Image: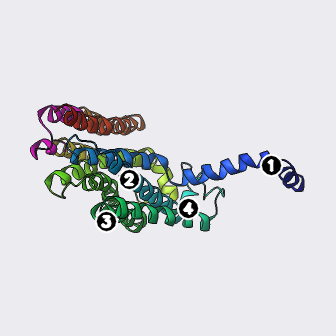
Amino acid sequence: MALTHTAELALPTAAAPGLRARLGAYIELTKPGIVRMVLITGGAGFFMASHGFLRFRPLLWTLLGMGLAAAGACALNEVVERARDARMRRTAGRPLPDGRQRVGEALAFAVALSVAGGGVLAGRVNATSALLGALTIVSYVGAYTPLKRVHWTATLVGAVPGALPILAGWAAAGGRLDGRGLALFGIMFAWQMPHFFALAWLYREDYRRGGFRMISERDATGHRTARQIVVWSLALVAISTLPSVTGMAGVPYAATALVLGLLFLLQALALLRAPTDARALRVFLSSVTYLPVLLLAMVLEQLLA
């Protein structure tokens, strides 16, 4: 051990891998996949409220603020759930459970990101987007995170912070919190149900080890989980057409939404007929494809109008 420390002092370049590892741990703490989804949905909401006229600088400030807030919320979530993450194979390698990062450092980092995100939105965008950003953090960390240990319906609560970013993006561009903005919120809310229920089935044993009360916890056959996936997939078919009903989008978008929704529903029905891991994985992967294609169809119609 002493030789290792001496080598690091004698050869400054040897410290580089350690620095890279620490930076990597901080990045990993923010759950980049979730942050990326927040930026995509927030950007889509901003664009839809802009009516096809892209304001580059306000968009950048919006994405920066939302990205920081989302990263802070994810990091706070990992701080709170570090002990349970250590029990799960899927999450045991995260920075806190495997000891790559100290709790105090992670907490300070998470709080700094959250405050910075709210500050950017409040100072450079508008009060409504900042309020929605703060609500995202509070509902994710203060409501969804503890409720996951109590009852599977926490997934419904967790869908709220998951759906708020698109509404925050809409508000950041000056959109009112009316039927059009709520239609975007509704799409994101409904989409998360089959997405996360499929994930809950795939990782059901892991979630049990972690002590999380997911819908799959007392579902030996998978039919209970599959029924919920079908119900929410049906709801998504209807809700996804609301942008056309509210005048935010037209017939081409509505047709695309219906086709995408029905294809997704077919995957859900297949899972209900025979609940297997392979079919649950297809539902999950279909959901990952569905959302960006739907948002792209919405944005493209604005561009081509």
Is label 1 or label 2 in front?
2
- Specify the amino acid type for callout 4: Arg
Relative placement, left or right, of 284 versus 105 is left
N-terminal-most mark, 1 or 4: 1
Q: Main secondary structure of the magenta part?
A: helix
- In percent of the image, x 34 and y 54: which residue is there? 162
Instruction: Report the Cα–Cα distance between label 1 and label 4.
Output: 33 Å
- In percent of the image, x 60 and y 55: which residue is there? 95
N-terminal-most mark, 3 or 2: 2
Residue 217 visible in this rendered orientation of the protein: no
Rendered image coloring scheme? rainbow
Residue 238 visible in this rendered orientation of the protein: yes
Q: Disc 3, disc 4: CB below 8 Å?
A: no
Q: Residues within 10 Å of mark 1 (few under 14, many from 20)?
A: few
- Judging depth in this view, the residue of 280 and 141 nearest the camera is 141
- Specify the amino acid type for callout 3: Leu
Q: Residues within 10 Å of mark 3 (few under 14, many from 20)?
A: some
Where is residue 85 drawn, in percent x and y? 54, 57
Disc ID at residue 82: 4
Q: Which residue is mark 3?
A: 131
Instruction: Report the Cα–Cα distance between label 1 and label 2.
Output: 37 Å
Q: Residues within 10 Å of mark 4 (few under 14, many from 20)?
A: some
Instruction: Report the Cα–Cα distance between label 2 and label 4.
Output: 31 Å
- Quarter of the picture containing the C terminus is top left
N-terminal-most mark, 1 or 3: 1
Label 2 sits on a secondary structure element that is helix
Q: Is residue 52 above or below residue 106?
A: above
The range drawn in magenta is 240-262
Where is residue 166 drawn, in percent x and y? 29, 51
Q: Which residue is mark 2?
A: 61
Task: Judge whether residue 97 is colored magenta.
Answer: no
Q: Which residue is mark 1?
A: 12
